[in-house]
Structure formats: C-alpha cells, structure tokens
Amino acid sequence: MPIFTAYDGTELAYHEKGEGEPLLCVPGGPMRASAYLGDLGGLTAHRRLILLDLRGTGDSAVPTDPATYRCDRLVDDVEALREHLGLEEVDLLGHSAAGNIATLYAARHPKRLRRLVLITPATQSLGLTLGARDHLDAAFARRNEPWYPAAEAALKEIAGGRDPLEVWEAIVPLAYGRWDDAARAHQAASAREKNAEAAALFYGDGAFDPAGTRAALAGLTAPVLVLAGEYDAAPNPAQAQEFAGHFPGGVRQVQPGGGHFPWLDDPEWFARRVAGFLAQD
C-alpha cells in the first residue's frame, strides 16, 4: 500500500488497481474510504486506477487539524498525490461529494488537468442546490418498487423538516438503480468506511465560492464528462446538464437505469463510456 506525505505532514494512502495510464480517483461519501469504488465496474481493464483514501479515511492517517477535512482544503491532497506520482498532467475522476473536490481542483490547477470525469457529482461548488421536490420527482420513477411507499413517505417527512438520518433506511434504496443483494452489501459497508466526524466538517463555512469557481473554470481547456444516473436525484439528469454547462468542454451522459453508484447497476455500460471518453484525443 503506497503512502505519501501531504502538505501538513499527514500520511495519506492510495491503492492501485489495473494497468495502463493512471486515473486518479477521489471518493465521495463525503469522507468515505475508497474501497467502495471497487474496480469501478471493470474500468481496471482500461486504466490503472489510483484510488485515494482521503485523510482520516481508509488507510490514511488522521490529521492533527480537523479543519483540514473541509472540502476546499482536500484539493491540496489531490495536488500532493499528483506531485508524488511525478505526473505533469492527470486524468481525474471524482464521485458524488468528491465531484466538489474535483471541480475545485480544476478551478485551482487547470493546467494540471488533462481530462475530468465527474460521476453523479455533488454540485455545491458551483452553487447548484437540490430541493425536496427533486428527490420526490426522482423517486416517482421507482413507484413500482416494493419499497417505494415507505421511501415516498420518508421524503415527505424530510421536506417537512425531519432529519434524513432518522428515516435513512427507508430512503437508501433510492441511491441504487437496483436494490438487490449487491446494493445492500455495498450500503452496509458504508458505516465502517465513512469518517462521520470528517463528513460533518466537509461542507464547513467557507468551503465554496461558487462565483469565483465558475469564473476560474471559464478558462479550462480539459474535456469534462459529467455522468448522471437515470434514477439519481443528486444530481438528476437535468441538473447534471446544467452542471456540465459550466465547463467549456463539458458533456453530460445519462446511464439508463443508473443510480448514484452507476458502476454497480450496469458495469459494462459504465466502464465502456468512461473508458471511451478518456481515450479521446
């Protein structure tokens, strides 16, 4: 397991899978160990995945200063990994909450980015927010599922002010395109893979400057893929299209039947589309 040292002396770990050109992969959660990414639907057949364990997660050390868990400060860890690997430019992938980290990296280090892949990305970095109606609309597409009535009721309670964590078991199937045994196992691993303290600080005050980030991205030359799931609400396909529009080279693709972890729902489709994008000149 390779280790490198971040800007503040924190020792960070990463895991390598597959062969070929490196693809730096940043996990979401927020603050979930990279193990949940697996091999990204077999993407290892096309690229060498460099799976970063963010500070305080997985095999990476806990930092001395908890304030460094804030999203914008994690960008420096990605840059430290690039330097450690000796790469002039990188292909970068961010999933979910790490869509924010990857977007901020693109704004801060545009010349270091060759291609950017954002998988069902969180959108706070660009000032795009999701409402209760968005989640209800996305859920309605699953109305024939046996768990749907409980999920719908829970979403309405959340819209009324209830803490999502209190009804989490009812709504968690919405994150997956198929709520099968593989999805249940994937979800069950979340509790032991996620650093709750770090997650609580990830979106801290001052993490985002949407206007400044949008302005910085105007000069980005790297092509950007925003991959959304048909059934996902965070973001839904329309919001993913809006998000992609903030990147000069941004394109959106929607995975049919995909949820928030689309590589689990149709691994072949996912790996083929991502690998195809990364292989473009």
Image (cartoon, rainbow, N blue to C red):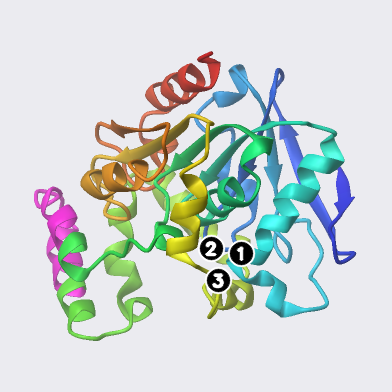
Residue at 34% from the left image edge and 71% from the top image edge: 168
Specify which label sits upstream in the sequence, 3 or 1: 1
Disc number for residue 47: none
Residue 62 position, x and y percent, is 79, 70
Question: Residue extending furthest bottom?
Answer: 161
**Is 146 a magenta residue?**
yes
Per the model, the C-alpha gap separating discs 2 and 3 is 13 Å
Residue located beneath label 2 in the image: 30
Q: As shown in the figure, which amino acid type bears the numbered disc 3?
A: Ala
Residue 227 shown left or right of residue 140 in the figure: right
Per the model, the C-alpha gap separating discs 2 and 1 is 13 Å
Residue located beneath label 1 in the image: 72
Label 1 near label 3: C-beta < 8 Å?
yes
Residue 182 position, x and y percent, is 43, 43
Residue 262 shown left or right of residue 62 in the figure: left
Label 3 near label 2: C-beta < 8 Å?
no
Residue located beneath label 3 in the image: 207
Residue 24 seen in the figure? no
Query: How dense is the environment of label 3, judged by Cα within 10 Å: few (below 14), some, or many (20 and up)?
Result: some
| Segment tinted magenta in the rendering | 136-154
Indicate the secondary structure of the residue bearing disc 1: helix
Kindly indicate the quadrant of the structure image that contains residue 172. bottom left
Q: In this view of the protein, which residue sits in the foreground, 145 or 142?
A: 142
Residue 37 position, x and y percent, is 56, 43
Q: In this view of the protein, which residue sits in the foreground, 258 or 103?
A: 103
Q: In this view of the protein, which residue sits in the foreground, 217 or 73?
A: 217
Kindly indicate the quadrant of the structure image that contains residue 94. top right
In the image, residue 239 sits, relative to residue 42, either above or below, namely below
Residue at 32% from the left image edge and 55% from the top image edge: 234
